[in-house]
Image (spheres, helix red, strand yellow):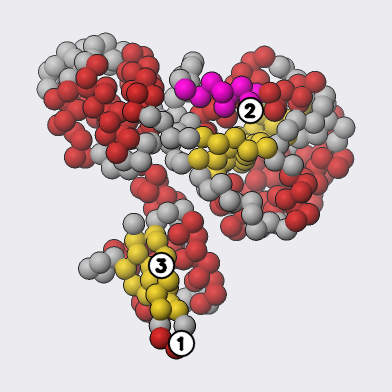
């Protein structure tokens, strides 16, 4: 396609973006209703039900939350919603600062202590008298870095007549299991499970996006994209990437329709989305661990050998205890697998394999 020429393929390329929030979310109607019902008291001066959304990556947890948040803000002027991804805000100070900024509490990004930020947030909440709902997406990252951090969020409600509601999102259904009992009981969470999409549900979702994005497409092309997304873990983002690449391939080929052949031509370039995102986001030390495993023929090492290789490469290594935390975190987000191997009379040792 020549520069400046109108596309013969795309009506709206942005409809295939993972950031695009469609007007409807097919096959998530039940989860939307439960979450909306749980949060509805916030619009009426009452305490909302804290809610935990869990399930595999790319099956609508974040989209459902943002969808409900948009509905609330459009419907209730007395409700303020705040979305926070804990990969970007991994400490309680950064989370509270983000909340303060969104509430226009004039919290600076640096140089302000946690207690002062809390005071400003509480002061603003009291003056606004709004219902406030906060989503902590990928909450396991915050808990991993600061296990007691949620207690500070719960402290806010001690000073408010209109309590803040909390929505948590994680791929790990057991993310709260090791919290201190006082924190776990105070959270008062209701869980909403998100099950994987079936092939036909995935097809419906991608067909809806394709209708928004393309001028013309073959239904069989959408079915093939859906099938491939299911084989790559059922992640909708994989399906969207397939459609985006197939559309661009059709455009470059001079076609006026996204066909099955367009999809087939780009399938080999599409990989699972979640691992690639996680590899970019993990801390430096964990990146080094993954690089060392990548260099092994079978992409696996025993933890003792892995720590030795890590120490030699990094120059100023963390302690073995902290190193084990890194290993456990990588296992938790499914970038590695840990298996126990017997070691004679000396007990067991752990074999780490990169996935």
Q: Say whether disc 2 or disc 3 marks the residue closer to the N-terminus.
A: 2
Q: Say whether disc 1 or disc 3 marks the residue closer to the N-terminus.
A: 3
Is 140 above or below relative to 310?
above
Q: Using the rendered image of the protein, determine whether residue 302 is visible from the camera's viewpoint.
A: yes
Q: Position of residue 130 (x, y in %)?
A: 78, 25
Magenta stretch: helix, strand or loop mostly:
helix
Residue at left offset 82%, top offset 24%: 45
The CA span between labels 2 and 1 is 51 Å
Count neighbours of disc 1 (C-alpha within 10 A) and say few if under 14, some if 14 to 19, many if 20 or more: few
Horizontal arrangement in the rendering, residue 152 relative to residue 305 (left or right)? right
Q: Say whether disc 2 or disc 1 marks the residue closer to the N-terminus.
A: 2
Which residue in the protein does label 3 denote? 339
Q: Nearer the viewer, residue 99 or 272?
A: 272
Which residue in the protein does label 2 denote? 35
Q: Within the magenta stretch, is there residue 96?
A: no
Q: Secondary structure at mark 1?
A: helix
Is 353 above or below relative to 150?
below
Q: Secondary structure at mark 2?
A: helix
The disc label shown at residue 346, or none = 1
What span is in magenta?
27-36
Q: Using the rendered image of the protein, determine whether residue 125 is visible from the camera's viewpoint.
A: no
Count neighbours of disc 2 (C-alpha within 10 A) and say few if under 14, some if 14 to 19, many if 20 or more: many
Count neighbours of disc 3 (C-alpha within 10 A) and say few if under 14, some if 14 to 19, many if 20 or more: few
């Amino acid at each position: 396609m020549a520069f400046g020429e109108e596309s013969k393929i795309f009506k709206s390329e942005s409809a295939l973006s993972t950031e695009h929030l469609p007007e409807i979310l097919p096959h998530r109607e039940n989860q939307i209703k439960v979450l909306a019902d749980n949060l509805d008291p916030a619009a009426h001066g009452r305490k909302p039900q804290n809610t935990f959304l869990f399930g595999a990556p790319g099956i609508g947890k974040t989209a459902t939350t943002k969808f409900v948040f948009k509905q609330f803000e459009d419907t209730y002027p007395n409700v303020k919603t705040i979305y926070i991804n804990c990969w970007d805000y991994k400490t309680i100070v950064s989370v509270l600062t983000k909340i303060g900024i969104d509430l226009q509490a004039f919290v600076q990004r640096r140089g302000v202590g946690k207690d002062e930020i809390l005071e400003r947030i509480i002061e603003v909440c009291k003056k606004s008298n709004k219902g406030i709902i906060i989503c902590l997406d990928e909450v396991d990252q915050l808990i991993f870095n600061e296990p007691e951090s949620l207690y500070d969020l719960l402290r806010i409600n001690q000073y408010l007549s209109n309590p803040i509601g909390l929505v948590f999102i994680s791929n790990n259904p057991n993310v709260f299991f090791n919290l201190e009992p006082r924190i776990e009981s105070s959270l008062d969470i209701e869980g909403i499970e998100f099950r994987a999409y079936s092939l036909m549900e995935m097809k419906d979702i991608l067909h809806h996006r394709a209708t928004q994005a393309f001028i013309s497409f073959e239904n069989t092309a959408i079915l093939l994209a859906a099938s491939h997304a299911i084989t790559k873990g059922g992640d909708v983002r994989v399906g969207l990437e397939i459609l985006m690449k197939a559309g661009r391939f059709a455009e470059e080929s001079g076609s006026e329709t996204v066909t099955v052949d367009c999809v087939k031509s780009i399938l080999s370039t599409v990989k699972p989305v979640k691992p690639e995102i996680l590899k970019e986001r993990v801390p430096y030390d964990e990146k080094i661990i993954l690089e060392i495993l990548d260099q092994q023929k079978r992409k696996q090492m025993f933890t003792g050998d892995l720590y030795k290789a890590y120490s030699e490469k990094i120059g100023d290594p963390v302690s073995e205890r902290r190193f084990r935390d890194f290993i456990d975190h990588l296992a938790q987000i499914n970038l590695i697998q840990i298996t126990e191997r017997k070691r004679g009379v000396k007990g067991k040792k752990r074999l780490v394999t990169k996935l």
